[in-house]
Image: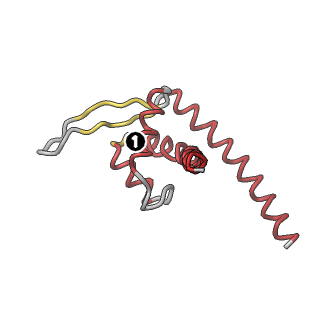
Amino acid sequence: MMSNQNEEDQSQKLSSWGLVQPAVLLLIMEKPRHGYALLEELKIRGFIPNSADGGNVYRGLRRMESEGKISSRWIHSTGKGPRRRIYEITPQGRDALYEEALNLANRAKFIELFLSEFKRIF
């Protein structure tokens, strides 16, 4: 029973990342960002809840980098702060973002149709 719950939890994390990934690409397309700034911006814009686990975002960033959708580089801060890894979108990432936008637009049409029918029936 416990393994089924773990599988469901993992499945939920993966499916929710599937919705967050386009938002991450969009924000990085807007301007290169370091992980913490990206996490905060995702929360501010409502793409993830304030209680979201930042570790999932960082793991997702590493995954997208290994897939070639984003690249990163280290920069040193001008003050005493720590160096930061800045993420930038790649041409492959731009293509993926465009495809995700088309897919989301199609999903939105389906959701609107479904909700319209739901309201009609109920």
Vertical position of residue 95 compared to residue 114: above or below: above
Q: Where is residue 88 in the image (x, y as percent from the top left)?
A: 40, 34
| Residue located farthest toward the bottom when viewing the structure as drawn | 122
Closer to the camera, 35 or 4?
4
| Residue located farthest toward the right when viewing the structure as drawn | 121
Q: Position of residue 102 (x, y in %)?
A: 67, 41
Q: Residue at x 60, y 37 (%)?
A: 98
Closer to the camera, 32 or 34?
34
Task: Say which quadrant the C terminus sits in.
Answer: bottom right
Residue under label 1? 58
| Residue located farthest toward the front when viewing the structure as drawn | 1
Looking at the rendered structure, the secondary structure element under dot 1 is helix
Q: Which residue is drawn at 82% across and 66% down?
A: 118
Q: Left of 53 or right of it: where is 11?
A: right
Instruction: Tally the marks.
Output: 1
Q: Position of residue 32 (x, y in %)?
A: 38, 40
Q: Left of 109 or right of it: where is 45?
A: left
Vertical position of residue 73 compared to residue 6: above or below: above
Circle 1: is it few (<14), some (14-19), or many (20+) Cα within 10 Å? Answer: some
Q: Which residue is drawn at 21% across and 38% down?
A: 83
Q: What type is the residue that disc 1 sits on?
A: Tyr
Indicate the colouring scheme: secondary structure
Q: Position of residue 36 (x, y in %)?
A: 33, 48
Vertical position of residue 39 compared to residue 114: above or below: above
Q: Left of 111 or right of it: where is 48?
A: left
